[in-house]
């Protein structure tokens, strides 16, 4: 008789993550998760007081997966910001169920733009913009906010099949958007400095 593996929060959350990734958040319930794990619902409810508590752990796993995805293979791009934007859109295309779970549900778990630019890392994501473009922290924040709105919009349309993912097209559009934002901020700064 095989020895059954003891259910832990990690095992359950990992299975929940895969369930959301493969079938979507709408399929995430205790009964479906128990079927995937090959157990009754009892061990799941023993480890978790509520389904919302379970979803929080799954969201943490999904958020880490997505964060790692954003920074992988950023090669062949002229700017790290373009690479991050392109990977964000690619993530929505390749992992649409996870994208919707992370960004388009009522639980963002701190993964919104405010967390990116004001988090514990003191806005580390802004450093390349400040260094490469010579912008102040304030201007870099404004630039990233506008840029994020653009690539999040593309990603959302792709995640819901409203737009087809085409890497070359997305990269060209991101270049236009990103450098247009930077040029606009620099122009406004130059205009203000010339009137002082």
Image (tube, grey):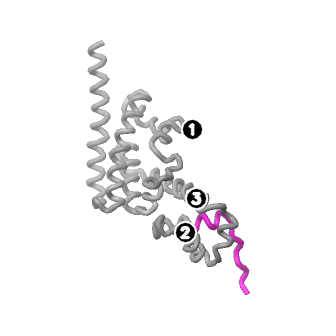
Q: Residue at x 38, y 57 (%)?
A: 90
Q: How many marks?
A: 3
- Category of crowding for the residue at label 2, using alpha-carbon neighbours closer than 10 angstroms: few (below 14), some (14–19), many (at least 20): some
Q: Nearer the viewer, residue 8 or 94?
A: 8
Q: Is residue 74 left or right of residue 107?
A: left
Quarter of the image for the N terminus: give it.
bottom right
Q: Is residue 121 left or right of residue 142?
A: right
Measured as percent of width and height from the top left, residue 66 is found at: 48, 55
In the picture of the structure, the residue carrying the numbered disc 3 is 52
Q: Nearer the viewer, residue 149 or 69?
A: 149
Measured as percent of width and height from the top left, residue 175 is found at: 29, 44
Q: Is residue 147 left or right of residue 28?
A: left
**Element assignment for label 1:** loop
Which is more N-terminal, label 2 or label 3? 2
Quarter of the image for the C terminus: give it.
top left
- Category of crowding for the residue at label 3, using alpha-carbon neighbours closer than 10 angstroms: few (below 14), some (14–19), many (at least 20): few
Span shown in magenta: 1-15
In the figure, 193 relative to 144: above or below? above
Residue 131 location, quadrant? top left
In the figure, 170 relative to 180: above or below? below
In the figure, 179 relative to 137: above or below? below
Q: CA distance from mark 3 to mark 2?
A: 10 Å
Q: Residue at x 35, y 54 (%)?
A: 155
Which is more N-terminal, label 1 or label 3? 3
Q: Residue furthest top?
A: 196
Q: Is residue 130 left or right of residue 163?
A: right
Q: CA distance from mark 2 to mark 1?
A: 33 Å
Residue 194 location, quadrant? top left
Q: Residue at x 67, y 72 (%)?
A: 42
In the picture of the structure, the residue carrying the numbered disc 2 is 29
Using the image, tell me which numbered label, if any, was put on residue 120.
1
Asked whether 23 falls inside the magenta stretch, the response is no
């Amino acid at each position: 008789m095989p020895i059954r593996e003891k259910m832990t929060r990690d095992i359950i959350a990992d299975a929940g993550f895969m369930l959301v990734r493969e079938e979507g958040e709408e399929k995430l319930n205790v009964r479906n998760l128990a079927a995937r794990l090959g157990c009754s619902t009892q061990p799941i409810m023993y480890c978790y007081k509520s389904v919302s508590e379970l979803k929080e752990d799954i969201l943490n796993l999904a958020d880490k997966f997505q964060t790692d995805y954003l920074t992988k293979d950023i090669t062949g791009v002229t700017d790290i910001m373009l690479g991050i934007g392109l990977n964000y859109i690619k993530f929505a295309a390749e992992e649409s169920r996870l994208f919707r779970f992370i960004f388009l549900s009522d639980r963002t778990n701190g993964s919104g733009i405010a967390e990116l630019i004001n988090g514990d890392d003191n806005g580390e994501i802004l450093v390349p913009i400040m260094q490469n473009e010579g912008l102040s922290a304030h201007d870099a924040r404004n630039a990233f906010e506008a840029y994020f709105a653009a690539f999040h919009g593309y990603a959302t349309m792709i995640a819901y099949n409203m737009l087809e993912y085409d890497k070359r097209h997305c990269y060209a559009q991101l270049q236009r958007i990103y450098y247009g934002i930077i040029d606009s901020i620099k122009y406004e700064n130059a205009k203000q400095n010339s009137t002082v």
